[in-house]
Amino acid sequence: MFKAKIFIKRRRTILDPQGKAVELGIKSLGFENIKNVRIDKFIEFEIDEVDEEKVRNEVDKICDSLLANPHLEDYYFELEKI
Amino acid sequence: MFKAKIFIKRRRTILDPQGKAVELGIKSLGFENIKNVRIDKFIEFEIDEVDEEKVRNEVDKICDSLLANPHLEDYYFELEKI
């Protein structure tokens, strides 16, 4: 069994309006020394399979066909044996 | 200057409806061996400050007062010197 930990990130060249809104919120709290706020998705799930190579292929397929928008987002992931 | 990498996670005892929906989606693709899908937020920003202890306190305050919902979510973060 493995746990997949997947980061789905909007490409840095593409505006992140939610991040911009949060940046304004943080600054309005008085923290003026922050910049480049980005909000991304972190997805975890468990996979009942013993072969790490198979797991890696499966997670790639799941990201490519469902989790990540290929026009806007990139992803990377780590696997943890559990 | 530091980069803060913050994970905001809904407590595991609290239902994650978005995770459940994605889990159904993954299973409908034919990947039946996955479970416990959770979708959380991953937030990054840069902080123009040299004192790591000050940065740590500042990020704690930002999380407590804006980024994390104290009723539903926990957070942890890593700092990277840049």
Image (cartoon, coloured by chain):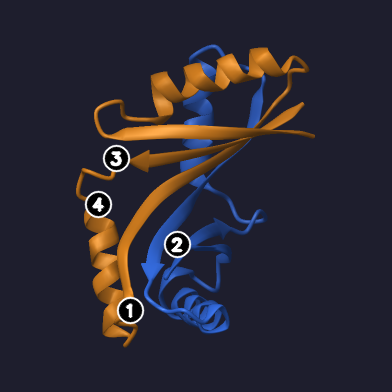
Chain colours: A blue, B orange
| Disc 3/disc 4 C-alpha distance (Å) | 9 Å
Circle 4 crowding by C-alpha within 10 Å: few under 14, some 14–19, many from 20: some
Q: Chain of mark 3?
A: B
Where on the picture, by quarter, is residue B31? bottom left
Check the image and name the residue furthest to the bottom: B30
Question: What residue appears at the point 56 percent right and 64 percent down from the top-left corner?
Answer: A73
Mark 1 vs 4: CB contact within 8 A: no
The residue nearer to you, when weighing B43 against B81, is B81
Which corner quadrant holds the C terminus of chain B?
top right
Q: Amino acid at mark 1?
A: Asn
The residue wearing badge 1 is B33
| Disc 3/disc 2 C-alpha distance (Å) | 20 Å
Question: What residue appears at the point 44 percent right and 77 percent down from the top-left corner?
Answer: A62
| Image coords of residue B34 (percent x, y) | 33, 73
Question: What residue appears at the point 26 percent right and 34 percent down from the top-left corner?
Answer: B72
The residue wearing badge 2 is A82
Instruction: Give the foreground label among 3 and 1.
Output: 1
Q: Amino acid at mark 4?
A: Asp
Instruction: Give the foreground label among 3 and 2.
Output: 2
The residue wearing badge 3 is B11
| Image coords of residue A75 (percent x, y) | 57, 65
| Disc 3/disc 1 C-alpha distance (Å) | 23 Å
Element marked by disc 3 = loop
